[in-house]
Image (tube, grey):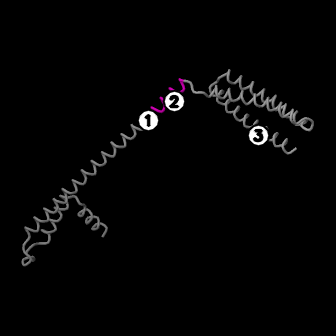
Amino acid sequence: MDTEKAYADRLQAQMRTADARLDEMEAAARARNAKAEMDEISGLRAQRDRVSKHVADARKKMRDDWEAVRREVDVEWTGFRRSVNDAHTKYTAWDSVREQRFNAHLDQADAALRRSAAQDAEVAADARVQLAEAGDELKSKADSARRSYKAWRDRRPSRDSIGLVSRPSAASALARAERDTDLGLARDRQLDAQVG
């Protein structure tokens, strides 16, 4: 009796799997609005109902002639599974139009990826140019500041006569150097003076 129950349970599990496949096929047919497919799926559901009824009847008769019932159900079940598989293959098969559409979508995706990569490379190149220009400008301003400082040092009197150079003159030279180089030191001092 355990073998008979296991057989019936296996058949029920297979029927649930077939129902899921029929549901999937029906949803796809509804999405395509394919009346002929939906009619065929309805026929398959009717065939499944006949097999299900036969299984229910077989369970009642199981005690009498188990092997005969099993052979009869197996024949019906095999025919039903073959019909479902044939319909599934027929309605999900790739035709040449679907294949061309699929390949066109892949080509579009590849083109979009290439365009995105080119745009990324362009933005990166622009950023590198701007960084290089900013670096060159900073080097130029630093060189100018060094020259201004050197010129100021060359013009200032020796340490022996440091008392003769006025502080405003030194501060003025430093302010000119900061202004010319725009390094922000004068601005920082001005902010400190306003806060203080």
Tell me: 87 left or right of 174.
right
Q: Quadrant of residue 46?
A: top right
Of 27 and 48, the residue lying toward us = 48
Residue 177 percent location from the top left of the image: 17, 62
> Mark 1 highlights which residue?
110
* Residue extending furthest toward the top: 36
Q: In the image, 35: left or right of 178?
A: right
Distance of label 1 from label 3 (alpha carbons) = 43 Å
| Residue 129: in magenta span | no
2 vs 3, front mark: 3
Q: Amino acid at mark 2?
A: Phe
Q: Report if residue 101 lies within the magenta region.
A: yes
In the depicted structure, whether residue 34 falls above or below residue 53: above
Q: CA distance from mark 1 to mark 2?
A: 12 Å
Residue 102 bears which disc, if any?
Answer: 2
- Asked if the residues shown at circle 1 and circle 2 are in contact, with their CB atoms under 8 angstroms apart, the answer is no
